[in-house]
Amino acid sequence: MSVAFHQRIQEALLDERLQKALYAATGRLMEKRKSGVTTDQLPDYQELRTHANRIKRHTLENLDYYLETLTRNVEARGGHVQWCRDAGEAQVFIGQLARERGVKLVVKSKSMTSEEVDLNEALQQQGVEPVETDLGEFIIQLARQRPYHIVAPAMHKTRQQVADLFEERLGVPREEEIEKQTMIARAVLRKKFLEAGMGISGANFLIAESGAVVIVENEGNARLTTSSPRIHVALAGIEKIIPRAADLAVFLQLLGRSATGQPLTSYTSFLSGSRRPGELDGPDEFHLVLLDNGRSRVLADREKRQTLYCIRCGACLNICPVYRRIGGYSYPGAYSGPIGAILTPQFLGLQHEPELPFASSLCGACAEVCPVKIEIPKILLELRSEVKKAEAREAGWNLEPSNVEKIGFGLWAWLMRHPRLFELAGAAAQILLPADRDGKWLRNLPGPLQAWTRWRDFPPPAPRSFRQLWRTRRKAS
């Protein structure tokens, strides 16, 4: 584990205020999600998850076709499509577009993809002021921090801290009441909407058959961002595409419930190009920026390709026992929690933070709540294997199993296929492997197994095996 990664984790664990706020906030979101996907609320929840998984799998297996279809339909409606291989190309294109159009102020709706490419910092360096208009993102921008959570970026901030921040950064009287804080932010942001020459949004979904950009939100700021300025730029990863509008109904039923427990978010916007003759709202120019930034590399790996199914609901963060303790700032990169532990190493490379795939208990809760059925624990194990293989190659170790290992695993496989002998082996272990005085741990295993207990303890065999307990239960019943 890198020193910085370890230090961030320790700081989070020692912050009592943060621990209480984080556990309470994720707990509320988790309970809302749980109540939103019950049999009464959504009887076909599991079928919808399976269907969403299939749609994503089909789309990614035919991604070239759907991207070409999307491009044709966007351009047919007067829009422009820009392909960007990495964060640098996205920064250059958007910054250059702003300079060419004389834009000095940009308003932004919530977009994790723009956080991924550090767009705000790049625009500032090019003399363009970016302003976040989502309330949580606005707070985070004033604090000069990055989002703490995919859905709730200011989850770690108390209203008292926000009051101090508004007083310091905005020069307004200190106000702790949340409703009044919202009005303060609204007054500031309304002026920005009217003055901005460009609006930048993300995209929750891209519909190939129509070229529409779909944005879901609860505050209405995305609608102002995409309609008030004369230029709208939508920045989206290439994996956000779905084939048809009919497919969207599946994801909309899952996204709101998984993120905040809502049957549907307050606003769902379908944006198709620039304003056409006779229309009152909408931008004069529309640009769709399609970002790769490592996604093609993930797509090429059939085992880990399902990482790209993610719809950024944040459900895996809320239920993860690790995230709920160490929080969002312990993770490197824009994405945190279980999805961040598999996205970041694949986007940035395993060498960026090799210990990140190990920041998990592998309890499987993330896979249970994922609305598109991403097998996060499986991918974490594959990434861990890649990390260890890379370390072994760097150390010059032979990665081929020794003859002793081959024989050992062969015997184990044979034993597992013979239940009676497996049971006898378990009974023998109860006799031959007594625990220490505390009765809880084996501190020295015999023979080649000593390597295991050199660095860790091993739980002793249970006094009664599962098979013995099951037979007793069956006799009793």
Image (cartoon, rainbow, N blue to C red):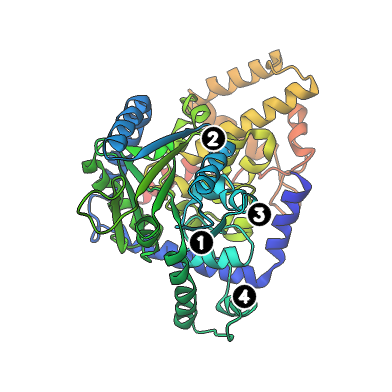
Please say if 64 is above or below 126. above
Q: Earlier in the sequence, mark 1 or mark 4?
A: 1
Name the residue beneath numbered marker 3: 330
Q: CA distance from mark 1 to mark 4?
A: 15 Å
How far apart marks 2 and 1 lie (CA) works out to 23 Å
Label 2: which secondary element: loop
The amino acid type of the residue labelled 3 equals Ser
Q: Foreground residue, 188 or 395?
A: 188
Of helix, strand and loop, which one carries label 4?
helix
Q: Which comes sooner in the sequence, label 2 or label 3? A: 2
Q: From the image, tell me which residue sits under label 4.
A: 165
Mark 4–mark 3 distance (CA, rounded to whole Å): 22 Å
Estimate the x, y position of residue 93 in percent, counting from the top left. 52, 40
Q: Amino acid at mark 4?
A: Leu
Query: Which mark is nearer the camera, 2 or 1?
Result: 1
Residue at the (40%, 41%) spot, across then down: 288
| Neighbours of disc 3 within 10 Å: few (<14), some (14-19), many (20+) | many
Q: Are marks 4 and 2 in contact (CB under 8 Å)?
A: no
Kind of residue at disc 1: Glu
Rendering coords of residue 221 (x, y %)? 39, 63
In the picture, measured across the screen, residue 2 lies left or right of residue 149, that is: right
